[in-house]
Amino acid sequence: MIIEWSHRWLAALVGVLAITSAIVAWRRARRWIAWVAISGVVVIGVQAWVGRLVVVNDLDADLVSLHLVISMTVAALLTVVTVATTPASGTMKSKAWAYLFGTGATVAFSVLLLGSFVHNVYIPGWPVMNAGVFPSLANKFVALHYFHRLVAAGGLVLLSWLAVRARRDLRPKFEQRLMWTGVGMYALAIGLGAAHVFTKVMWSGLVSAHLGVASVVWVAMVAVTASAAGLGAGRPPD
């Protein structure tokens, strides 16, 4: 009850801060930034409504995943606003790099989404399931777990490659720091995922930590994509 109560008050605080940000953006920032901030407020309202449905429907798994998707959408919108008002960002606009970083962000989001469906389902064995390298995918939870791990492994390789290439190609320090933060948090999320399996999905604290760290990866990838797209304060978009 204490956790749920705290969650609702923190959600209310996020709403107040988002409204405040939208007002300030409307008065002081470029108009497109203000509209992104306002969109964040609207999506938070939708998120609150879906949160009510989650409670009314006794934590229905699909609604919980939808609630998470909306949460990550809010995080992405507010991240874009932050990048758009950060002087160090957007100084080297590159469509190619925006696509590359965007691909990394898409993979990070896919890992989050797949994990949301199976976070409370115990499948023994890590990194390979006890059922083997190629388990039967007849059970949907086994299939989702399997694809979650495959995408997670591929994502670590992709993000690591992007971080190394960004450094080699002398991308702005702002973007390099974001990439290495993403890689570090991604590796930590994988470690927490392994611990989640080893504890047989019995510790909710690990679930929260796993999700929290994965969310940091998502935010970092959205931020670096926005910067490469030229949305930062360092260089206005065309």
Image (cartoon, helix red, strand yellow):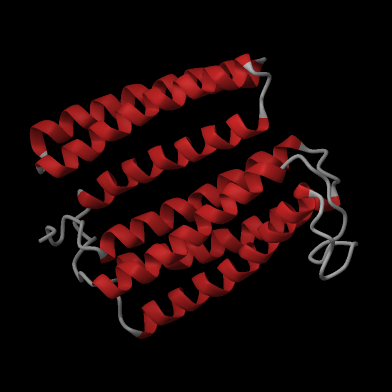
Residue 25 in the image: state x and y as whole percent.
16, 35
Can the viewer see residue 123?
yes
Residue toward you, 132 or 162 = 132
Q: Name the residue located 22 percent from the left edge and 30 percent from the top edge.
A: 22
Q: Which residue appears at 63% of the width and 63% of the height?
A: 152
- State left or right for residue 110 relative to residue 196: left
Residue 78 vertical placement versus 176 (above, below)? above
208 vs 134: above or below: above
Q: Quadrant of residue 81?
A: top left
Residue drawn at (81%, 42%) of the image: 201
Q: Decide if residue 100 is on the left or right side of residue 235.
A: right
Q: Where 113 sits versus 1, above or below?
A: below
Q: Quadrant of residue 45?
A: top left
Residue 134 spot, x, y in % from top left: 82, 69
Q: Position of residue 128 (x, y in %)?
A: 82, 66
Looking at the rendered structure, the number of numbered marks drawn on it comes to 0
147 in relation to 170, above or below? above
Q: Quadrant of the C terminus?
A: bottom left
Residue at 40%, 22% (x, y): give it: 13
Q: Residue furthest right?
A: 130
The quarter of the picture where the N terminus appears is top right
Outermost residue to the front? 138
Residue 19 relative to residue 145: left or right: left
Q: Is residue 176 visible?
A: no
How far across and down, in percent of the image, does residue 164 sit? 45, 80
